Image (spheres, helix red, strand yellow):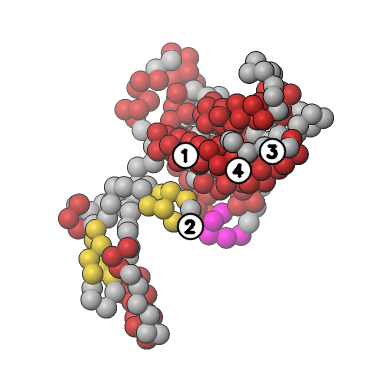
């Protein structure tokens, strides 16, 4: 990493460019060196930047070496609260109300959450204030069924969870069918999830029920999370017959995953991963 930064420093020096090193931050995922060695030198003055455990915001998206659901929910909830506080006391017609939510709020939420693995329940929880606000705008009772708001023949409001899983499944499909480094990285992440989930057959054909160890890997692996969601929606993905063998793991006669499912030994899973 330091060699890459040194090349960048030479480029900045040649073009007489100064970077604000005091605002530079660095995160290291799965470090292999000690804490005091997790540093790089930046700029003409060789300013030392220490790796941080805090979140870093880059192009509006929050990155961390230890992502947590609590932080994700906090960022999404803050965005929702800011939107609701801005428009709460304004008179907004029904058409403009749905436009602001579908074209302003939800795209912003989806952009922020593109590397998050929140569940449908999490999205329902953070979107609840918006539902309450819409019912208040429309002078509807609090017990009005939510289906009335989302039905295309009524208000036609989108739900962020629906848009989110459409985006991540589409993104997964595009990456797997591309000839790029993104495709290679996605396959590596899926193979890693396959090994840690004790799956020996082609992962695209497996029944990925939301068991405890599947949930654990899906929370930490964005491509695998998209695949699990696609399976839950009965969306199937196929792979070229030539490449099928590279996803299978040969071994003994008894399937480990079947054994753990049969005896429900989920606690032992974490010891083996």
Which residue: 67% across, 30% down?
Answer: 137
Which residue: 57% across, 60% down?
Answer: 180
Residue 255 lies, in percent from the top left, at: 48, 25
Magenta residues (range): 179-183
Label 4 vs 2, first from the N-terminus: 2
Magenta highlight: main SS: helix
Instruction: Determine crowd level at label 1: few under 14, some 14-19, many 20+ residues with C-alpha closer than 10 A.
Output: few
Q: Nearer the viewer, residue 203 or 186?
A: 186
Q: Nearer the viewer, residue 137 or 120?
A: 137
Q: What element does badge 4 sit on?
A: helix
Q: On the rendered image, what quadrant is the N terminus found in?
A: bottom left
Marks 1/2: CA distance? 17 Å
Which residue position is annotated with label 3? 92
Position of 210 with respect to 10 (left or right) is right
Label of residue 78 in the image: 1
Residue 88 lies, in percent from the top left, at: 58, 35
Tell me whether the residue at label 4 lies in contact with that at label 2, contact meaning CB atoms closer than 8 angstroms.
no
Label 1 vs 2, first from the N-terminus: 2
Tell me whether the residue at label 4 lies in contact with that at label 3, contact meaning CB atoms closer than 8 angstroms.
no
Q: Nearer the viewer, residue 87 or 110?
A: 87
Label of residue 105 in the image: 4
Instruction: Determine crowd level at label 3: few under 14, some 14-19, many 20+ residues with C-alpha closer than 10 A.
Output: some
């Amino acid at each position: 990493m330091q060699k890459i930064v040194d090349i960048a420093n030479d480029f900045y020096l040649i073009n007489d460019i100064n970077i604000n090193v005091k605002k530079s931050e660095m995160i290291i995922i799965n470090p292999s060196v000690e804490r005091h060695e997790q540093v790089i030198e930046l700029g003409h003055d060789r300013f030392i930047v220490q790796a941080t455990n805090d979140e870093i915001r880059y192009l509006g998206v929050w990155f961390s070496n230890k992502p947590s659901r609590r932080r994700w929910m906090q960022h999404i909830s803050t965005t929702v609260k800011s939107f609701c506080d801005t428009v709460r006391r304004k008179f907004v017609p029904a058409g403009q109300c749905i436009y602001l939510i579908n074209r302003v709020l939800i795209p912003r939420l989806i952009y922020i959450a593109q590397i998050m693995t929140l569940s449908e329940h999490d999205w329902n929880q953070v979107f609840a204030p918006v539902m309450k606000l819409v019912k208040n705008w429309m002078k509807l009772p609090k017990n009005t069924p939510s289906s009335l708001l989302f039905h295309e023949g009524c208000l036609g409001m989108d739900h962020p969870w629906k848009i989110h899983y459409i985006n991540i499944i589409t993104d997964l499909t595009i990456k797997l069918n591309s000839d790029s480094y993104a495709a290679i990285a996605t396959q590596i992440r899926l193979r890693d999830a396959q090994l840690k989930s004790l799956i020996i057959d082609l992962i695209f054909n497996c029944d990925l029920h939301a068991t405890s160890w599947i949930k654990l890997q899906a929370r930490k692996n964005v491509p695998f999370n998209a695949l699990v969601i696609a399976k839950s929606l009965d969306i199937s993905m196929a792979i070229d017959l030539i490449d099928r063998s590279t996803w299978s793991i040969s071994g003994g006669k008894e399937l480990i995953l079947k054994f753990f499912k049969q005896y429900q030994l989920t606690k032992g899973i974490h010891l083996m991963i």
